[in-house]
Amino acid sequence: MLIAGLAACGGDGGSGSGSSDDKITMGFAQVGAESGWRTANTKSIQEAAASAGIDLKFSDAQQKQENQIKAIRSYITQRVDIIAFSPVVESGWDTVLKEAKDANIPVILTDRAVDSKDTSLYKTFIGSDFIIEGERAGEWLKKEYEGKTDPVNIVELQGTTGAAPANDRKEGFAKVIGADPKFKVIASQTGDFTRAKGKEVMEAFLKANPKIDVLYAHNDDMGLGAIEAIEAAGKKPGVDIRIVTVDAVKDGMQALADGKINYIVECSPLLGPQLMDLAKKVVAGESVPQRVLTEETTFTQEQAKAALPERKY
Ligand code: GYE
């Protein structure tokens, strides 16, 4: 993808556009700084823009949709060449996306999806398949408890309410474990993708439920917060309560290598280079695929030990 993009842009001096020497200006409306994943994602976008020679206007919405909408409107007023954003929640984007379209400013979705029926409101969507991530967490659990018949009490820490990764990771997981009645999700609540909220909600789960076998956290950060709560309650994370999370950021991988998490489903935040490549193509009027999927893997404790020294984020 990246190689093809560089060849297309550099090979013939950017033919087709009268202002090919002008720098592309991108307005990027980020979700916030809620997790290690997000920090790595922001860094990837900023570094990739710099090395692609794209002038980046960057805003942080502090996990609030209204702030993102304001940022997008200001990018429209500033007449940037392209807008990219990671929608904090799935719903409620049609009006502002229509405004961008009417102003002839193309939009790229990164990381999270919108539920707009009109797919002409954006050029492409680059990011992970969160349903598959949820399924991978469920598949691991099924294997862990294969051949056992006792009930398995699961608590779930959901991501930000209404966010695509929260909706889809819940759905994918439920689909896989739902077929076996021994798996019981006894509590499920949002921890807003943050460490502090993960800890707080896990404390409440522990107080209300004497027997918790498994924690499924929609990201590493909530899992890491929950680990603090579990330890404070005198239990051993990874042993007394088995833990599966999503992301595979460094702190999560360290906890996995240390035996406090049992399994992590990877979700890559390094979307910057592909995003800049797609942005150049869109601005040049080239066609791009409607959906660009990120490639990801999963990690056991042993695999985390091996991967940690090379882990960049
Ligand atoms: O998993 C979580 C972050 O949208 C995939 O957002 C992203 C999620 C990621 O806060 O850590």
Image (cartoon, rainbow, N blue to C red):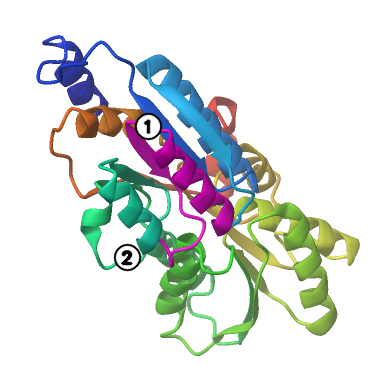
Q: Residue at x 68, y 57 (%)?
A: 222
Q: Which residues are magenta?
A: 65-93
Q: Position of residue 145 (x, y in %)?
A: 53, 74
Q: Is residue 136 magenta?
A: no
Q: Secondary structure at mark 1?
A: loop
The residue lying toward the viewer, choosing from 5 and 199, is: 5
Residue type of the residue flagged with mark 2: Ser
Using residue 205 as the reference point, say whether residue 64 is left or right of it.
Answer: left
Please identify the quarter of the rendering in which residue 276 is found: top left
Residue 116's tag is: 2
Residue topped by disc 1 = 80
Tell me the residue at 58%/51% (across/down).
Answer: 67
Screen quadrant of the N terminus: top left
Mark 1 near ligand 1 (CB under 8 Å)? Answer: no
The quarter of the rendered structure image containing the C terminus is top right
Horizontal placement of 95 versus 303: left or right?
left
Image quarter of residue 63: bottom right
**Residue nearest the viewer, comparing 26 with 19:** 19
